[in-house]
Amino acid sequence: MAKQYKTLGEDIWKNKVEKINAELFTLTYGSIVAQLVKDYEDFTEVNKQLEKMGYNIGTRLIEDFLARSGVGRCQDFRETAEMVSKVGFKMFLNITPAVTNISADGREFSLVLDENPLAECVELPDQALVDELWYSNILCGVLRGSLEMVQMQVDAFFVTDTLRGDDMTEIRVKLVRYLEEEVPAGED
Amino acid sequence: MNATHSSSSSGGSGIGSGPLGYGNTPTCYFVMIGTKDNPIYEAEFPAVNTARSSSGGATIPEAKKEEFRHLNQFIAHSALDMVEDIQWSTNQMYLKAIDKFNERFISAYLTAGNIKLLLLHDAKSEDAIRNFFNDCYELYIKTLLNPFYEPNSIISSAAFDTKVRLSAKRYL
């Protein structure tokens, strides 16, 4: 099952996706974070803003993802995890984070990124290490936004980050609940 | 004072000590100077590649070392004028040895962003210094890619410092 996602992801990356220069991407994201840090001066606030930006991106990105990949509904949250890591991340960032630490009830998993294109050549200032700045927090927002559009409310947050001196970069994704389709107000 | 210095540095670049009692400290002084003549990074590398120099380093008292540091800065900054003259005559980034002070040479490397890398050293092979400068230039470029680094500001990263010292150990 995982194999077919992997090949699907690679196939889409090779054929159906337009590519941009990686350095340009890294520098653009870097200047966004640097500017946010300068403007807000409070790293918790910067984290929140990055997550909000990610959320807005995620709600739109899911359409792109479904259109290009043409996959159907996932059977359970485990499949969602595989789909996100092997197809989603591969398609947009050309990385395949490993899915680890799936909880017993299958409602939580971790994504371990061994390379992070957003954070090439980045060194956090000392103050950012003291207060918690999660440099790539936009990814958490993207996960939350895109999964919400497919009826899953999740909590995504960073556990460790190599930029902060930890061994690896890990995002924890927790399923809060499945969202029911709501009838729009005014209709019977 | 002079006698101590000349006996300890048996090899190196000559026995002479300058008019200020400035003996042969076998250290190289490396400084990176920004566009407004502001130093953005400086480091000293004791020359550890020869056995004779290790004894030389031990006999210099700490107070004298401070003086050498000030003198090094002074020498390097006075060489800046030479850099600005020579930079128009060549299209190379590596300007080789541009100035001399007593027995010490000053080599310079000018980056495209008008950052000057200066090295105070005793007689050394040009190639070694060229390689060292190239290494430092690449490390500087990586620093520039860091979004949190203000161009022309002081480089305080410990990682940068470690890598520069490693490169110095290899080439100098």
Image (spheres, coloured by chain):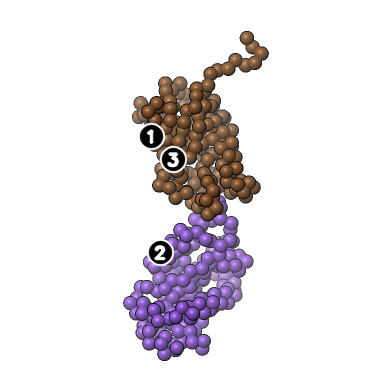
Chain colours: A brown, B purple
Residue B101: give x, y in percent of width and height.
51, 82
**Mark 3 — residue?**
A170
Per the image, label 2 sits on a secondary structure element best described as: helix
Instruction: Measure the alpha-carbon separation of dots 2 and 3.
Output: 31 Å
| Residue hosting label 2 | B166
Question: What residue sits right under mark 1 in the picture?
Answer: A101
The answer to the question of whether label 2 and label 1 lie on touching residues, with beta carbons closer than 8 A, is no
Q: Label 1 lies in what chain?
A: A
Q: Are marks 2 and 3 in contact (CB under 8 Å)?
A: no
A29 w.r.t. A18: above or below = below
Residue B140 visible in this rendered orientation of the protein: yes
Residue at 57%, 70% (x, y): give it: B87
Q: Secondary structure at mark 3?
A: strand
User: Do circles 1 and 3 both sit on a common chain?
Assistant: yes
Identity of the amino acid at label 2? Leu
Q: Please report the residue visible at 48 percent of the width from the left and 51 percent of the height from the top.
A: A121
Determine the chain carrying the residue at label 2. B
**Cα–Cα gap, marks 2 and 1:** 39 Å
Q: Earlier in the sequence, mark 1 or mark 3?
A: 1
Pick the quarter of the image with the N terminus of chain A.
top left
Distance, label 1 to label 3, CA atoms, is: 11 Å
The residue sitting at 49% across, 37% down in the picture is: A157
Quadrant into which the C terminus of chain A falls: top right
Picture coordinates of residue B96, whole percent (x, y): 49, 72
